[in-house]
Amino acid sequence: MKENVVHHRVISRRTKPLVVCALAILAGGVATASLAQSTATVNVTGNIQGTCNVTGGSTTTINLGNVSVSAFSGAGTTSPISAPQNIVLTCTSSPGITMTMTGTQAPSGPNTTLALTGTTGIATGVGVQILNNGTGTPTTPLVLGASNTIPTGATVTIPVAARYYAINATPGAGTANSTATLTFRFN
């Protein structure tokens, strides 16, 4: 006689979740859990900027001519202002424009006065000031390293002029050349 033997398996509490999960997968189901949802908001800020290019006066030479030492009556006095020279910016829109002057400050001079360049035969006790007041006749000395707001537009003309500035009571004669760089930033 043949005996039917029935084997019983005892499922412990530790293996029961695995068996349920395996049975669910074998039966074609998937064991899933409910997840809570949450949202986030992303705000984007910014600007579309125009660009500008120097289209006139990228290298400007201002000739102050021959100025007599007797034109200065003491420290802080100046020579006559040169005729203005124009720097022209052409812009794709009307961005905000700032201008900053860099160069070497004259020893013992104010932060508006550039040092003279050269190695021999240089004038003493005098420096150069670059002038601009936004539009019109340039009358205001630019401060080295300071940001100056420039009127904006599709085409912007920036007049600049120069003059000598006496640092000492009695400047000494000689060549009196100087160089400055004007940097334009757009926003």
Image: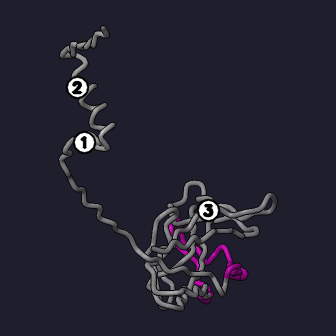
Residue found farthest to the right: 120
Q: Is residue 66 magenta?
A: yes
Out of 64 and 169, give the one closest to the viewer: 64
**Gap in angstroms between the C-alphas marked 3 and 1:** 71 Å
* Disc 1 target residue: 32
Q: Is the residue marked by circle 1 packed among few (<14), some (14-19), or many (20+) residues within 10 Å? A: few
In the shown orientation, is residue 154 left or right of residue 175? Answer: left
In the shown orientation, is residue 111 left or right of residue 172? Answer: left
**Gap in angstroms between the C-alphas marked 3 and 2:** 79 Å
Q: Position of residue 15 (x, y in %)?
A: 25, 18
* Disc 3 target residue: 103
The label nearer to you, 1 versus 2, is 2
Q: Position of residue 163 (x, y in %)?
A: 59, 77
| Disc 1 element | loop
Amino acid type, mark 2: Pro
The label nearer to you, 3 versus 1, is 1
Tell me if residue 20 comes above or below residue 76 in the rendering. above
Residue at (43%, 78%) from the top-left corner?
A: 96
| Disc 2 element | helix
| 3 or 1: tag closer to the N-terminus | 1
For the N terminus, the image quarter is: top left
**Magenta stretch: helix, strand or loop mostly:** loop
Amino acid type, mark 3: Gly
| Disc 3 element | loop
For the C terminus, the image quarter is: bottom left
Q: Is the residue marked by circle 3 packed among few (<14), some (14-19), or many (20+) residues within 10 Å? A: some
Amino acid type, mark 1: Thr
Give the number of the disc on residue 165.
Answer: none
Which range is magenta? 58-85
* Disc 2 target residue: 17
Q: Position of residue 2 (x, y in %)?
A: 31, 10
Image-quadrant location for residue 106: bottom right
